[in-house]
């Protein structure tokens, strides 16, 4: 299947260009923010009352935005291309040239939540649970943008749904970006939504965080089996990719949070 004719740039006005990738970040942050507000307003989800009000959640959006951008960029610099940026340190700030890492963005969001919760005297785990329930929204849009940008494609495949990417050579490849949008985004959002709205897991602080970390880590590790490793990294050892290595601590931490959350009253 040939790659659809999709322009990464939606429109241009002089030097200004709106790209699908930027729109994905905006959509993920704005929709995630609205979803967190929805969660905080549902009294039946919080037996002891919601951890934060509307004003605090509005302020949290700015913190999360900085955490995503700064953490995602620094994560890419440190985890995926440290050698290049040691030689070209000025390029660290050139976010418009591409290069963001989800694991780094996750760490940035965690730091933002910890600082914000302490400054506003908000239960840290409950605040993190709400954010964790909304993160798959951003993942979904972000992976769709990766597909439109023809980046992070998969390995060569003979499957009928393989895609010939314009910068991926003449052979069809797994559309791994769409796999990730489906697993890490849509399916994980539905799973968390069912557990939140039907099973009431927000009443157990940390449990939603645990399910998200475990679900994302397992999904990413699985899809890495068909995703083409970064050209400058390749396989770290014995067919293991950097994405899989970074996902293992997530799975381990997720299991710990699940166990602690199930034990909480």
Image (cartoon, grey):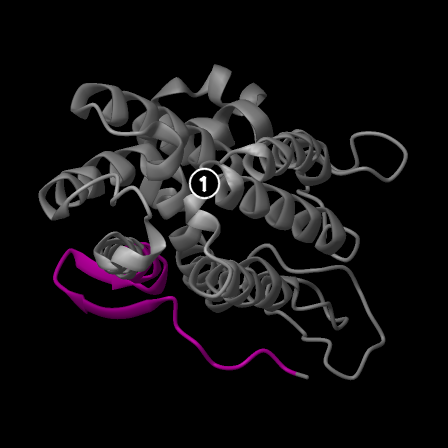
Depth order, front residue of 168/32: 32
Query: Residue at horizontal 67%, vertical 37%?
Result: 251
Q: Start and end of the magenta stretch?
A: 2-28
In percent of width and height, residue 81 lies at 56, 28
Q: Give how far across and how far down residue 60 sits, in percent.
A: 21, 38
Which residue carries the number 1 mark? 100
Q: Dot 1: within a 10 Å radius of its alpha carbon, few (fewer than 14), some, or many (20 or more) residues? A: many
Is residue 14 inside the magenta stretch? yes
Please state the horizontal and vertical placement of residue 134, each as a whole percent of the image: 38, 54
Residue 98, visible in the rendered structure? no
Residue lying farthest to the right in this orientation: 238
> Residue 31 is drawn in which quadrant?
bottom left
Q: Nearer the viewer, residue 263 or 77?
A: 263
Residue lying at 36% horizontally and 45% vertically, measured from the top left? 131
Residue at 54 percent across and 47 percent down: it is 212
Residue plotted at (25% across, 60% down): 38
Indicate the quadrant containing the N terminus: top left, top right, bottom left or bottom right: bottom right
Up the image or down, 264 lies above or below 224; here it is above
Question: As displayed, is residue 222 above or below residue 253?
Answer: below
Q: Is residue 162 visible?
A: yes
Please state which of residues 196 and 118 is positioned toward the viewer in this rendering: 196
């Amino acid at each position: 299947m040939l790659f659809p004719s999709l322009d990464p740039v939606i429109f241009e006005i002089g030097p200004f260009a709106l790209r699908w990738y930027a729109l994905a970040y905006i959509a993920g942050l704005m929709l995630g923010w609205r979803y967190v507000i929805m969660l905080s307003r549902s009294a039946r989800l919080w037996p002891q009352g919601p951890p934060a009000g509307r004003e605090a959640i509005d302020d949290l959006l700015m913190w999360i935005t900085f955490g995503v951008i700064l953490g995602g960029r620094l994560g890419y610099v440190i985890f995926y291309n440290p050698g290049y940026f040691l030689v070209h340190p000025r390029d660290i700030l050139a976010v418009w040239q591409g290069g963001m890492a989800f694991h780094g963005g996750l760490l940035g969001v965690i730091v933002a939540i910890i600082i914000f919760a302490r400054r506003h005297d908000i239960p840290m785990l409950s605040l993190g649970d709400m954010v964790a329930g909304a993160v798959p929204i951003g993942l979904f849009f972000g992976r769709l943008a990766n597909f439109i940008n023809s980046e992070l494609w998969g390995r060569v495949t003979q499957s009928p749904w393989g895609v010939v990417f314009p910068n991926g050579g003449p052979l069809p490849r797994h559309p791994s970006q769409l796999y990730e949008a489906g697993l890490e985004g849509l399916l994980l959002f539905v799973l968390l939504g069912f557990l939140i709205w039907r099973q009431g897991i927000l009443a157990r602080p940390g449990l939603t965080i645990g399910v998200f970390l475990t679900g994302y880590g397992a999904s990413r590790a699985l899809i890495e089996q068909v995703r083409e490793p970064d050209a400058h990294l390749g396989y770290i050892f014995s067919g293991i990719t950097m994405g899989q290595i970074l996902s293992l601590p997530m799975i381990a931490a997720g299991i710990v949070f699940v166990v602690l959350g199930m034990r909480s009253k």
